């Protein structure tokens, strides 16, 4: 029983493509269309740049601050014994412990002296081809506006650099009491300090189905929060359209609290999608999609899929707001070429995201600027920091890695959305650490890939209904899509042909973006090189014209002789086919 499954319709996936995702401003179909176009670019950015494909974190040296690790692994001693007995029966590679280990090279955070050697601060530990000046993160200070615990929080242990590309989020076998305890603790953070009205408490006690042991109160609370999302949204709409507010139910819950729940549940849904999409069949030893897993964890809980879409809108809006911020950001200190490419790629991606409140409108949150409003924001931030700390209780290396990356990614999205202010407000923008930017882009990549995987699972379900083999159908459609797909390596340099989103349903209206200023003017050096390129290409055109002159003169002479012949015979003289001079067209340069 999910915390929100009291709303789930078990037989149909009630996600009407035309419907707007609750609390976001775009429909499911709009977000799907956006994702289809943006997905290859996000993948490319996350996986093919040194800056975004390595993450620094303290993976092994932090203790779970909430309970002892032994309890975290398995609360029930019988369960531990049974699990171990079974684990020994299966080949090592299939054991949860093996599956959960990190793969690929690691590098330790360098000391200050090493950091000053900008070219090779990690001494080649991540491999020879890695641009270390893009990967290493210089020590910096924390900011009280952070929504999660920064990875460089502890001065003594600065952590390791790991490759995200070499440690994909997939099935690890991590399950049971340990995993449940972590999820439970995460959902518990959704109980905000603002007291709930008595009417709601009685509703919670009587209105919800009996939840599983260990999930009872928190998840019941969360389920109710989710239900209230709808009410808050209706109130917003009603206010806009002038409906008298008293006609609606009293405002007994706040939007912020529900957004918190949706973010967590959407993250949980993304993790479930990835583990179902890249699942180890322990009978055949093959990795691949597990349709049954999808049906049980996602399809039968449409609200979880809806939260996944909500997270997409939420994080996409934050990445869109980075458009001007990254203009002066240094991605690779010792490598201007890589720095320029990475910057160009992220700016191009950010510019392709519809601006303004077209996909998510953060301006409706934290609008209550009373004492209570400020404390609500504070509460929100502290609770998110706690979720980040809970990740140290995850007893599986790979799950912990991705749990930390994603909480940091959402924390960064919150920071960008709520601390960057509007362009016209002149708010001093907090600095984004390297780990924050990396986490944000990789979180977007995870959600974007999860939406793609959901699409694949839907196609598999349709195939199954038609009596076809779902796996074979998926393979065939992937093969044809791959043939038609753009070559990802090309995208590193290719930013001219970014898709146009003006065709998206309903996204054209109300472009009232006050938070995203117009793109910055190109720098003097950019302008210089742009002009230089035009002059160079014109010069090359002139040289080419001179080289072709003899051939052209011969052709002109031939044409003029034909005209003279026409005149001599008394026939109508054919038209002159050449011109003495014409300016070159842009396409010829
Ligand atoms: C931070 C973290 C990262 C993890 N990463 C991985 C990984 O990379 N690979 C891997 O194989 N396993 C991973 N796991 C384990 C995985 O998430 C499950 O816990 C595990 O597969 C057991 O699943 P389950 O069916 O028992 O339910 P769980 O997914 O553990 O869910 C527990 C309960 O929460 C409710 N619930 C489930 N989904 C949602 C949702 N979207 N919204 C609201 N409520 C929900 C349900 O009531 C469910 O019974 C991770 C766990 C954690 C805590």
Image (cartoon, rainbow, N blue to C red):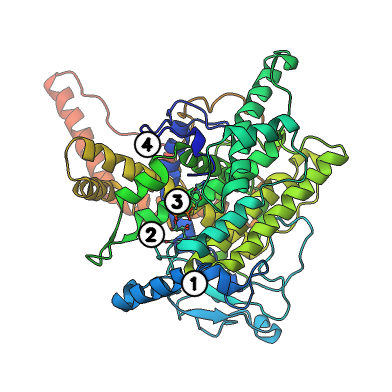
Q: Earlier in the sequence, mark 2 or mark 3?
A: 3
Q: CA distance from mark 4 to mark 1?
A: 94 Å
Name the residue at the right extreme: 371
Q: CA distance from mark 3 to mark 4?
A: 47 Å
Q: Earlier in the sequence, mark 2 or mark 4?
A: 2
Q: Which mark is residue 489?
A: 2
| Dot in front, 2 or 1 | 1
Residue hosting label 3: 41
Vertical arrangement, residue 12 with respect to residue 413, above or below: above
Residue 82 horizontal side relative to residue 218, left or right: left
Residue 539 in picture, x, y percent from top left: 46, 53
Q: Which mark is residue 77?
A: 1
Label 4 sits on a secondary structure element that is loop
Q: CA distance from mark 2 to mark 1?
A: 50 Å
Q: Earlier in the sequence, mark 3 or mark 4?
A: 3
Residue hosting label 4: 580
Contact (Cβ within 8 Å) of mark 3 with mark 4:
no
Mark yes or no: residue 538 visible: no
Instruction: Specify whether tag 4 is near ligand 1 (CB below 8 Å).
Output: no
| Dot in front, 3 or 4 | 3
Residue at left 33%, top 59%? Answer: 279
Vertical arrangement, residue 418 with respect to residue 244, above or below: below
Toward the viewer: 455 or 201? 201
């Amino acid at each position: 029983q999910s915390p929100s499954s009291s709303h789930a319709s078990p037989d149909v996936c009630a996600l009407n493509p035309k419907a707007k995702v609750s609390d976001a401003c775009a429909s499911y179909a709009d977000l799907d269309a956006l994702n289809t176009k943006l997905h290859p670019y996000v993948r490319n950015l996350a996986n093919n740049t040194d800056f975004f494909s390595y993450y620094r974190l303290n993976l092994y040296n932090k203790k779970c601050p909430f309970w002892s690790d032994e309890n975290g692994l398995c609360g029930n001693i019988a369960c531990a014994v049974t699990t171990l007995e079974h684990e020994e029966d299966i080949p090592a590679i299939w054991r949860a412990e093996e599956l959960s280990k990190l793969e690929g090279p690691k590098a330790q955070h360098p000391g200050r002296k090493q950091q000053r050697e900008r070219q090779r601060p990690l001494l080649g530990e991540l491999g020879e081809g890695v641009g270390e000046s893009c990967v290493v993160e210089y020590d910096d200070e924390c900011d009280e506006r952070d929504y999660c615990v920064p990875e460089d929080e502890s001065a003594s242990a600065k952590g390791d650099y790991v490759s995200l590309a070499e440690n994909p989020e997939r099935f690890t076998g991590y399950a049971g009491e340990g995993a449940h305890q972590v999820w439970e603790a995460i959902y518990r953070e959704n109980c905000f300090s603002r007291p709930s009205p008595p009417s709601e408490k009685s509703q919670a006690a009587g209105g919800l189905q009996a939840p599983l042991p260990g999930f009872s109160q928190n998840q019941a609370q969360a389920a109710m929060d989710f239900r209230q999302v709808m009410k808050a949204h209706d109130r917003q709409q009603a206010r806009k359209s002038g409906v008298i507010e008293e006609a609606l139910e009293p405002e007994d819950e706040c939007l912020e609290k529900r957004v918190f729940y949706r973010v967590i549940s959407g993250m949980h849904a993304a993790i479930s999608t990835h583990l179902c999409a890249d699942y180890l069949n322990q009978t055949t030893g093959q990795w691949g999609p597990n349709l049954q897993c999808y049906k049980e964890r996602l399809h039968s809980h449409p609200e979880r899929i809806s939260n996944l879409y909500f997270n997409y809108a939420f994080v996409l809006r934050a990445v869109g707001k980075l458009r001007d911020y990254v203009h002066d950001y240094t991605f690779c200190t010792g490598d201007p070429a890589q720095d320029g490419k990475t910057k160009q790629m992220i700016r191009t991606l950010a510019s392709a995201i519809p601006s303004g409140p077209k996909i998510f409108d953060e301006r409706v949150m934290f609008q209550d600027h009373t004492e209570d409003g400020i404390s609500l924001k504070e509460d929100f931030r502290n609770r998110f920091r706690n979720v980040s700390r809970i990740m140290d209780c995850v007893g599986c290396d790979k799950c912990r890695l991705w749990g930390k990356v994603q909480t940091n990614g959402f924390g960064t999205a919150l920071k960008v959305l709520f601390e960057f202010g509007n362009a016209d407000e002149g708010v001093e923008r907090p600095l984004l650490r390297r780990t924050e930017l990396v986490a944000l882009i990789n979180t977007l990549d995870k959600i974007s890939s999860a939406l793609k995987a959901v699409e694949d699972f839907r196609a598999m379900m349709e195939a199954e209904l038609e009596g076809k083999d779902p796996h074979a159908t998926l393979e065939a459609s992937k093969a044809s899509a791959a043939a038609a797909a753009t070559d990802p390596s090309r995208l590193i340099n290719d930013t001219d042909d970014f898709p146009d989103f003006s065709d998206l349903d309903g996204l054209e209206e109300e472009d009232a973006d006050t938070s995203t200023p117009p793109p910055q003017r190109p720098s003097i050096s950019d302008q210089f090189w742009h002009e230089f390129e035009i002059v160079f290409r014109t010069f090359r055109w002139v040289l080419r014209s001179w080289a072709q002159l003899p051939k052209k003169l011969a052709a002109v002479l031939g044409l003029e002789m034909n005209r003279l012949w026409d005149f001599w015979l008394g026939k109508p003289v054919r038209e002159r086919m050449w011109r003495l001079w014409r300016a070159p067209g842009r396409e010829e340069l």
